[in-house]
């Protein structure tokens, strides 16, 4: 099956710093989604981005489907950005289901 | 707020017992997927229900079973609980079988002792 790898596994930033999170996937996919999981476990949709670039405030994402990777950029980080960031790829082999990476744990220090 | 609710929030069970977790999907959504998230891992797909029928299953044993009701709410049942079943259980609802939009509930944290 499809493998999804994320890097780095852990990241500590000072408030105001920028960061780039990476997601590599091993096969072509129907869709790719970035999530932020807050400390209470809620998964929050950030971007649906099977290809191209999207921006939402301080966050932006780029997926290069032909090269099988996606990047999530966080600019001017805030303490509320802390949590775990997951990318998940949608595979439609029989069932539309998401395959998640192992996540990047981000801690932003005040 | 995704409109997807789960109950209970937390649950403690003993090895060998049975548990039922519940999920109410977002209004207008007829598809519900269940995921298990072990500590420090990404969520793993358990199974999906579409219009009251199971529509695909991940690599989980038969003691994990589910139901979907006519109002599209869903249950996840786990029999003969094992210590490794301790995890956060997430449900996600989507507006259709072929939709990429999945909205996750807040999860149920199950601890098996």
Image (spheres, coloured by chain):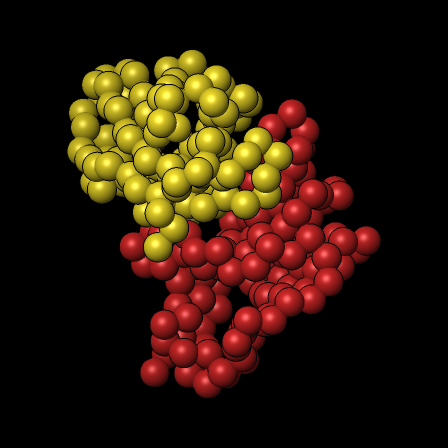
Q: Which chain is yellow?
A: B
Q: Quadrant of the C terminus of chain A?
A: bottom left
Residue B36: x and y, percent? 41, 35
Q: Quadrant of residue B72?
A: top left
**Residue sitting nearer the eye, B12 or B24:** B24
Residue extending farthest to the front is: B28
Task: Tell me if residue B35 comes above or below residue A13 in the rendering.
Answer: above
Residue A58: x and y, percent? 52, 77
Residue extending farthest to the right is: A66
Q: Quadrant of the N terminus of chain A?
A: top right
Q: Residue at x 29, y 55 (%)?
A: A40
Q: Which chain is red?
A: A
How many numbered discs sit on the rendered protein? 0
Task: Tell me if residue A61 comes above or below residue A41 in the rendering.
Answer: below
Whether residue A50 is visible, yes or no, is: yes
Residue extending farthest to the bottom is: A16
Task: Tell me if residue A56 comes above or below residue A38 in the rendering.
Answer: below
Residue A91: x and y, percent? 65, 37
Q: Residue at x 38, y 50 (%)?
A: B2
Horizontal side, residue A22 vs residue B36: left or right: right
Horizontal side, residue B17 vs residue A98: left or right: left
Horizontal side, residue B90 vs residue B21: left or right: right
Q: Residue at x 24, y 19 (%)?
A: B18
Q: Residue at x 75, y 59 (%)?
A: A64
Whether residue B86 is visible, yes or no, is: no
**Residue sitting nearer the eye, B86 or B33:** B33
């Amino acid at each position: 099956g499809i493998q999804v790898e994320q890097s780095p596994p852990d990241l500590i930033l000072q408030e105001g710093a920028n960061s780039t999170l990476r997601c590599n996937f091993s096969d072509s996919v129907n869709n790719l989604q970035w999530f932020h999981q807050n400390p209470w476990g809620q998964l929050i949709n950030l971007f649906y981005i099977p290809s191209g670039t999207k921006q939402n405030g301080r966050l932006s994402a780029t997926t290069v489907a032909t090269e099988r990777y996606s990047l999530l950029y966080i600019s001017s980080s805030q303490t509320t950005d802390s949590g775990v960031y997951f990318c998940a790829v949608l595979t439609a082999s029989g069932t539309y289901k998401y395959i998640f990476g192992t996540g990047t744990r981000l801690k932003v220090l005040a | 707020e995704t409109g997807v609710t789960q109950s209970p929030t937390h649950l403690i069970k003993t090895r060998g017992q049975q548990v039922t977790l519940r999920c109410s999907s977002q209004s207008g959504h007829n598809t519900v997927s269940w995921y298990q998230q072990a500590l420090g891992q990404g969520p793993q797909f358990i199974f999906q229900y579409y219009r009251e029928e199971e529509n695909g299953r991940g690599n989980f044993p038969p003691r994990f079973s589910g139901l979907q009701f006519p109002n599209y709410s869903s249950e996840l049942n786990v029999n003969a609980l094992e210590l490794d079943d301790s995890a956060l259980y997430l449900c996600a609802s989507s507006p259709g079988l072929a939709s990429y939009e999945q909205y996750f509930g807040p999860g149920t944290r199950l601890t098996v002792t």
